[in-house]
Amino acid sequence: MTKGMTRGRGTRAAGPRAYRRRPPYLTGGIAILVLALALLGPLAAPYGVTEPVAAPFQQPGGRFFLGTDILGRDVASRVLGGGRTIVVIAVGGTALAGIIGVAAGVLAAMVSPRFGDFVLRAVDALAVLPALLLILVLAAGFPGSDSAVVAAVALATAPFSVRVLRAAADSILSSGYVEVARARGDSRTSVLRHDVLPNIAGPALLDTALRLVASLHLTATAGFLGLGRGGTAPNWGRMVNENLPGATLALAPFLAPALLLVLLSVCVGLLAGRLADAAGRGVA
């Protein structure tokens, strides 16, 4: 009787573990679909993304699958054309933050403890600034520039990458095989190339995935505030803001881009969390 109960508990315990280890097919598939829509959508837009084609806030149906927006532009065309900017800016900001994080974090770990502390104090001073304030300042200094938004997103997220990668590099530099390499006369460049960089690749990848989630949120916020490339250029964040006053007349013009933003952010966040969980199990 006791053995049977023990086996029953073991079976129930194995179920959740087996479930957690299943590849996130659904989450990954949705993320890929939204990314494909964002990147390839402009090629499939049936109308020009800036030209009025009918009366404002026309209901979905007929020639206009999602109706028209506040200026009478085809919502489906603007949805297809408005995601590329969000994705490119978020990925660009994440990549730039990753480069800053690796460079500054490794330098802080390898040069000297005093220099490392100086670098950390500098990034801490940057980290206390609100991310939205950085975006507003840079966007105001370079109006209509998507590059300014990319730089702001990178500066807002890089301080956390620097801390993570400095800690990872410190752990590697204090390991036995690095001490052996130094004892046999390997140069600092050789240690960096053969020991440090290959071994922080995993933490850097995980940190990049987590920073991408924050970058998507910041990029969508910048678009909602009308920052970056302005005018009539489509942007999912900006579409939510500009069509919100007509929510009682037509839901699709602001609901469609909002749902796509939510889907993309949630799916990328879940995938990043799954990657972090897998990394944690690997360490354990």
Image (cartoon, rainbow, N blue to C red):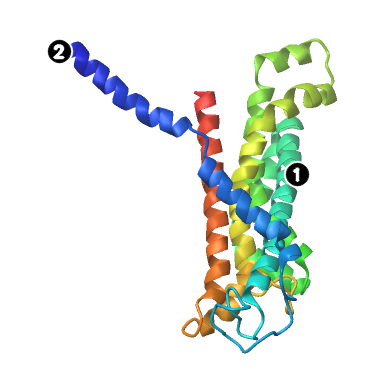
Query: Which residue is at the front of the view, 252 or 100?
Result: 252
Q: Residues within 10 Å of mark 1 (few under 14, many from 20)?
A: some
Residue located at (62% from left, 33% from top)? 167
Give the tally of numbered discs. 2
Residue 4 numbered tag: none
Placement of 283 over or under 133, stated as above or below? above
Q: Is residue 147 above or below residue 111?
A: below
- Amino acid identity at mark 2: Met
Of labels 1 and 2, earlier in sequence is 2
Position of 10 with respect to 133 (left or right) is left
Regarding mark 2 in the picture, which secondary structure is present there?
loop
What amino acid type is highlighted by mark number 1? Answer: Ile
In the displayed structure, 114 sits above or below 150; it is above
Task: Read off the residue under disc 1.
Answer: 99
Which x, y percent locates residue 212?
Answer: 63, 50
SS class, disc 1: helix
Which numbered disc covers residue 1? Answer: 2
Give the x, y percent position of residue 38. 67, 59
Label 1–label 2 contact, CB within 8 A: no
Comparing marks 1 and 2, which lies closer to the viewer? 2
